[in-house]
Image: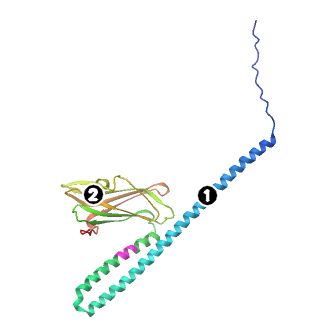
Amino acid sequence: MAKVKGSKQERLVVRAHRPVRTLLIRIVVVSLVLFMGLGGYWYGQRTAFQRQAEVEDEIIRLKQEIVQKSNELSESRLVAVAAEKGAQVDQMANEEVRQLNRQLLDQIADLEAEVALYKGIMAPAIGNKGLTIKEFEIDSTTDLNRYRFKLMLTQVGTNKDYIQGVFGVNFVGKQGGKDLVLPLKDVSTAHQKLDIKFRYKYFQDEQGEVVFPDGFIPERVQVVAQATGKKAMRVEKFFDWNALEITNNAGQ
């Protein structure tokens, strides 16, 4: 029996026409989209207000600390003047007064440096913005080759948000007459990575100890910091080892 050839028959699907149900579904979808949008906007506003409150609280704290340091500075100056007057009255206590005066002058210098630091963070100089390598300090110890260090990174100009990234420290010098560069991870047991992470709003201190190999003579300290994200920038600074005021803490 011969097969009948013809066009391919399409299947028809019959669906119920429910305009009310379709309208309700569309209303529900639109409502959900609006609700999610309003919810996201409310959450963003709430988060922004919270961060703004944190920034304002931190600024108030720093301003109070500036006032406190300024008051201590004024008191120290008054004591120094009184000690100088006392030296004129009692010649027999000259040496003791001179030592006291020297201590007070050192204290005044430290306080002035702290006040200048906080003021520099709160009201930076024009053109000095973003990530800054503020200072690097060195203290000696009982061990000839062991030192304590302190590094301070700051953010000036626009410090309403956190700044983050990585930094590295290299000690440049000579050993056996040859140039040698020692990264921090090679001379510190507490810092095992070449790049050390940082995250702060105003400033961050990094402290630790380094132990140099025998015969190593440090000449310079190289600090490199790299901020990431919206505040991305790279800064580098060298500190002359001989110019650093190395505090003698041999008894500690």
- Residue ID for mark 2: 172
Is residue 123 visible to us here?
no
Instruction: Look at 47% across and 74% down and name the residue there.
Output: 63
Q: Earlier in the sequence, mark 1 or mark 2?
A: 1
Is residue 139 visible to us here?
yes
The way the protein has been coloured in the rendering is: rainbow
Q: Label for residue 156?
A: none
Residue farthest along the bottom direction in this orientation: 89
Three-letter code for the amino acid on which mark 2 is drawn: Val
Rendering coords of residue 104 (x, y %): 32, 81
Three-letter code for the amino acid on which mark 1 is drawn: Tyr
Measured in 3D between alpha carbons, the distance from the residue under mark 1 to the one under mark 2, in whole angstroms, is 50 Å
State whether residue 73 is above or below residue 136: below
Where's the C terminus, which quadrant? bottom left
Q: Label for residue 43?
A: 1
Q: Quadrant of residue 183?
A: bottom left
Where's the N terminus, which quadrant? top right
Please tell me whether mark 2 sits on a helix, a strand or a loop: strand
Q: Which residues are magenta?
A: 110-114
Q: Is residue 172 magenta?
A: no
Assess disc 2: are there few (<14), some (14-19) or many (≥20) residues with their C-alpha within 10 Å of its C-alpha. many
Magenta segment main secondary structure? helix
Of residue 119 and residue 41, the one placed in the foreground of this image is: 41
Rendering coords of residue 152 (x, y %): 38, 64
Please tell me whether mark 1 sits on a helix, a strand or a loop: helix
